[in-house]
Amino acid sequence: MPPIASTASSSATAVIGSHPAMQQVVDIARRVARMPATVLITGESGTGKSLLAREIHAASGRSGRFVEVACGSLAEPLLESELFGHAAGAFTGATSDREGKFLLADRGTIFLDEIGTASPALQVKLLRVLQELEFEPVGSSDTHRVDARVILATNDDLAALVASGRFRADLFWRVNVITIEMPPLRQRVSDIPELASHFLARAAAQAGREVSGFSTAALGAILRHPWPGNVRELQHAVERAVFLGSSNLIEAADLPASVLAAGPAGGDLGQGESPLKQALAAPERQLIIDALERAGWRRDMAAQSLGINRTTLYKKLKRLGMDVADLHATR
């Protein structure tokens, strides 16, 4: 079975990240890839839900294609036809029969993005398809049966939509079998340098330019930005810097103004520290916090998992201004 990748080197479209939250995502995806169960991927916009769905399909061993449908981009009549197809004469402009996405995904995977936007009428039809894998094209009485693995995604809180009456409870429980939550980029800061380098290499190849990396000022700005648009925003920011930059390093001035808005590093870092130390402090802090959380906030076990002794960990905590008791109380 093809592995679900979690590093930039393994695939141009791999799920990238060594942060524990991403490793958990990859582990769950790997375990369910060959199962027929419906998968619901949740998370903020730009976190990579579509990419993960593609990775699950690639590792599934299914012989059919991967078919993606953005449910929020089409009006209900068009979306129903897009999913289930239509018969000639079903509506104005339907001059011939047309296969829908579910039929195209036979023996493969259909990925329904933005499922929270589906109308009540469409939710009823989706529930039937998920339960029986049967449907009729619009304007036809012919029943089609398909063998399609269904993966759905949403950045909405489906439970809240159920409570407000905007999403069917029975459909919610039907899709909420295996849920994988994609963490926002701000919660896995330690993955940012690897992601940025990955996007840099791809963009430089596309632009035909020699770009070896980021200046310390640019890297510092990238690490300080909260990335509300998540991985997608990071990708676009790096691509812009490559396409508009002129040196063999990405400079801070090449980055979008929104990325520079966070200003210079401050807080716990000393004023006399070099830009490189400031740039590297954020991922180092995150790695230490992750290790402490995994170790139940036991410093000796955290140090062991990091491959350092306890004294070295204490020195790092002091240098970074990190109080373990305060951190533990806020987690």
Image (spheres, rainbow, N blue to C red):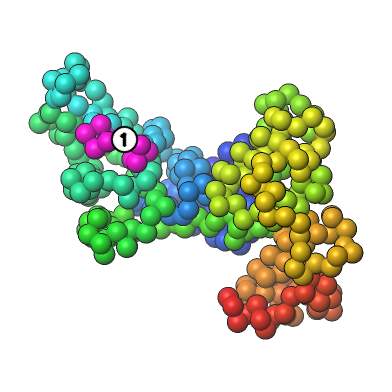
Q: Quadrant of the C terminus?
A: bottom right
Q: Which residue is mark 1?
A: 74
Q: Position of residue 88 (x, y in %)?
A: 16, 20
Q: Is residue 120 visible?
A: yes
Q: Nearer the viewer, residue 1 or 103?
A: 103
Quick check: is 76 in the magenta stretch? yes
The residue drawn where x is 27% and y is 36% is: 75
Element at label 1: loop
Q: Is residue 27 visible?
A: no
Q: Which residues are magenta?
A: 70-79
Q: Position of residue 14 (x, y in %)?
A: 59, 42
**In-image side of 201 versus 33 (left or right):** right
**In-image side of 9 versus 76 (left or right):** right
Q: Nearer the viewer, residue 252 or 238?
A: 252
The residue drawn where x is 79% and y is 41% is: 251
The residue drawn where x is 32% and y is 50% is: 116
- Identify residue type, mark 1: Leu
The residue drawn where x is 83% and y is 72% is: 319
Q: Nearer the viewer, residue 45 or 138?
A: 45
Q: Nearer the viewer, residue 215 or 67?
A: 215
